[in-house]
Amino acid sequence: MQHNRHHMQKTDMPHFPTHNPLKKELNLENIYQKLPIGIELYDEEGNLIDLNETDEQLFAIKRTDIIGINLFENPNFPTDQICLLKKGEEVAFDCKYAFDKIKTNRYYHIDPRQENTILYLSIKCLPLKDKDENIYGYIIMFSDETEKYKKIEETNELFNKLKTVIGDGDSLMWEYDIKEDKMHIDLELRDPAKPSKLNECSLTSRKDFYQLVHPDDRQRVLTEAFDKLVKGEIKGYTAQYRRLFRNEYIWVKAFVQPYKYDENGKPLKILYYLTDITNEINIREKLRAAEQERHQKNIELAKAQESNKLKSMFLANMSHEIRTPLNAIVGFSSLLADMQEEDMDERHFYVDIINKNSDLLLQLINDILDFSKIEAGTFDIHLKKFDFKEICEEIYAVHTLKIPDHVRFSFNRDLPSVKLNSDPKRLTQVISNFLTNAIKFTSYGEIKLDYRLEEDKIYVSVTDTGIGISEEACKNIFDRFVKLNAHKQGTGLGLSISKSIIEKLGGKIGVCSTLGKGSTFWFTLPLAANGVSDTR
């Protein structure tokens, strides 16, 4: 087509006689101008002679710019469709109408705004024939399907993205028709070549779905989530739960959302997207276990460091604690050897000092040995049947001689006898430790040894009116190397050893104290565990 055809005026149009049938078509102008589809009229040679307003709006162009263009030269029309049209056949096709092709082929002058624009059109072409079947023109009808095609393309793009996402993992998508109570699984989204734990899932109804959820998860996933969604009480949810696939429970994550509603806003169809997160859960559990192990090792390391620190302090302190009674024993033994026989009072004084320091040294050594056995796990308990009241009376008699002036020592001899199956030596050790501490820190008032039966256990206590212990100090009083008073002789192991003894015997140990008023050290032993045979 020549360039001057691009700008033909209406005056240049071919003249049609008034009786020409085509003119009758033009008389329908008032009707076709307002039709919701674009209409173009061409003469028998394919030259454009008229178009309606809808067509102008569709292509965003003035009629003066396109009158005279030739139908058969349109670069967007398929060649095979043009051939059929020339033969007098009706044709209909969908066309991706690209304005870049119009510009490239100089088909007609276009508005620059239309460049790079694409319309999706549904096109129908009809040859106009007279009674002798001679073609005297053509009519073209354009229906704009651009928005529809865009939505289709967007949907297809979304579908492809979804397919890619689902195909990359072990996932499944299905929909649930609430009214019909039917479930449809869409396996086409998955890559059939990839193995899946979810492929064998078969669902047809809500009942099938319920049976596949782990019993421990049903309340949370079904009653509190899915059932509420079906009733329209919630808009959607995400849940992790265990689900049965191939006779085993695996962890899955579900994204659930209604996508179709009735006129009242109640959901009609639900979209359910499911993905296997078993590996994720396993990795998460391994990480959690590793973190717990790391945390535990840090705690153990801190304890070991603290223990090493305490041990160092202990060893340094023990060199002093052991040296003190040894020096006293050696010194006063030498003095005793040089004394005259007639100095009996002074000899008794020296002997008493030697005996007290010998007892102290023996206690120090015993504490160290017991501590070593506890650390090595060789600390033994020897059970036998005995009368607990009898050992209390023996302990009372021994410690009566050690009670300082201005302090009253009491034990109720009317208490009932209790026969236990336990370790009398170790219990004596514990009670003696309680009393030794009470004697050290009580200058006035009373020290009391007592016990009572409480249903299924025996409660034993030593109460004093001494200096007492602060609330903060009570928290770690039974820890190793903790001394009640740094200025008093001792290893700081007595209470820690006592705690180990009582716990090995199945009991509990503790202290109640008020600073400045006194303390009560106590322990309990379960009667059944210690084999109480009778009380009298």
Image (tube, rainbow, N blue to C red):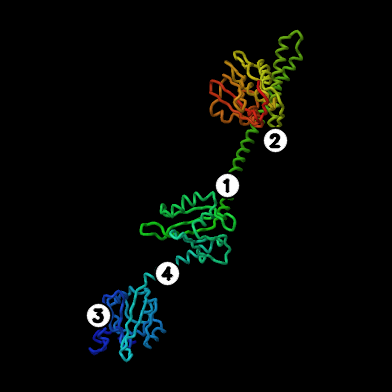
As drawn, the label of residue 153 is 4
> Viewer-proximal residue, 214 or 522?
214
Label 4 to label 3: alpha-carbon separation: 36 Å
Say if 372 sits above or below 29 in the image.
above
Residue pointed to by mark 2: 377
Total count of labels: 4
As drawn, the label of residue 29 is 3
Say if 145 sits above or below 535 in the image.
below
Q: Name the image quarter holding residue 359.
A: top right
Tell me, yes or no, if residue 202 can be seen here. Answer: yes
As drawn, the label of residue 291 is 1
Q: Residues within 10 Å of mark 4 (few under 14, many from 20)?
A: few
Q: Earlier in the sequence, mark 3 or mark 1?
A: 3
Which residue: 53% across, 23% down?
Answer: 515
Label 1 to label 2: alpha-carbon separation: 29 Å
Which is closer to the viewer, label 2 or label 3?
A: 3
Q: Residue furthest top?
A: 342
Which is closer to the viewer, label 3 or label 1?
A: 3
Label 3 to label 1: alpha-carbon separation: 82 Å
What's the amino acid at mark 3?
Answer: Glu
Q: Earlier in the sequence, mark 2 or mark 3?
A: 3
Dot 3: element: helix
Q: Are marks 1 and 2 in contact (CB under 8 Å)?
A: no
> Viewer-proximal residue, 468 or 32?
32
What's the amino acid at mark 1?
Answer: Glu
Q: Residues within 10 Å of mark 3 (few under 14, many from 20)?
A: few
Dot 4: element: helix
> Viewer-proximal residue, 510 or 205?
205
Label 4 to label 1: alpha-carbon separation: 48 Å
